[in-house]
Amino acid sequence: MTDLVSTDWLAGQLDAPDICIVDATRHHFEPERDSAAEYAAGHIPGAVFLDLLTLVDPDAATDNTLPTKARFEQRMRQLGIDNSQRIVIYDDSVVKTAMRAWFMFRLFGLEQVYVLDGGLARWKAEGRPLESGEVSRPASSYVASFDPSRLYAKGDVLANIETRERLHLDGRGSQHFTGQDDDPTPGIAPGHVPGSINVPFWDLFTPEGLMKSDDELRALFAGHGVDTARPAVVSCGGGVVACALALALRRLGNDEVALYDGSWTEWGADPALPKALGTN
């Protein structure tokens, strides 16, 4: 399935009336960087700024939780986004936040959604045009839907330890998965969900920041003992980089992938939940 588009392709589509370009940059681990200011200073022509920092559920128990359907719908209307458009999302983030946005858009019913392979870094490296300032589009009348099959809650993950209904893939680095290093968030226990498989998300990408080819992805997953045809649940530290695993699996034909949005931030904070250390 094609969920990635190239910079060459996008460059040829900039003037297409049904193209909507979205900057979904958010700097989770670089607090000194301001994604909104960077967008205003230089973005792909025509791109609107998503502002993932505010597109969350402020009432949720954990930070950075997916927004409610109503909050997402309101933001899409403000940005002039609806299902009549081909939506291309990019970022300039080390944690590939465009893939979080891609997952979110599909969760709430937007269908023609693509991620720019290589993101803004590749666009700029190729000397392609940028523009500055804000971009506004006419408001839309978008009505969101919601697909609950794309999400797993804590209870679902707990039940899955016994049923093994889905493979559980964890996209964190191995040092956090095994518990070798403490979690960077105070109060979060080390380790992983019992039975989960560690596939560090950065292994999905080439040194140039492009997602690896389908054959390379198949080999990568096979090396971790992952049957890419099986239904899966994906998680990470906070539900962001796990979305890259979801996109990679979909590229290989598997759309039965749910996100555990609370991820280790939620699981590791609950002393009542089982935790494993070491390799699986």
Image (tube, rainbow, N blue to C red):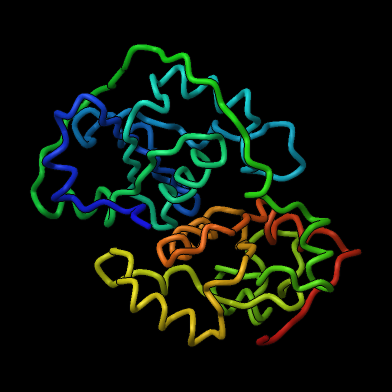
Residue 246, percent from left and from top: 51, 59
Q: Nearer the viewer, residue 265 or 205?
A: 205
Residue pictured at 52% horizontal, 57% vertical: 255
197 to the left or right of 245: right
Can you say which quadrant of the picture contains the N terminus? Answer: bottom left
In which quarter of the view is residue 162 placed?
bottom right
Question: Which residue of the protein is positioned furthest toward the left in this rendering?
Answer: 127
With respect to residue 264, does 81 lie above or below? above
Residue 95, percent from left and from top: 44, 57
Residue pictured at 51% horizontal, 63% vertical: 254
Residue pictured at 11% horizontal, 41% vertical: 12
In which quarter of the view is residue 10 placed?
top left
With respect to residue 14, does 30 lie above or below? below
Q: Nearer the viewer, residue 92 or 16?
A: 16
275 to the left or right of 46: right
Number of labels in the image equals 0
205 to the left or right of 258: left
Residue 81, percent from left and from top: 40, 24
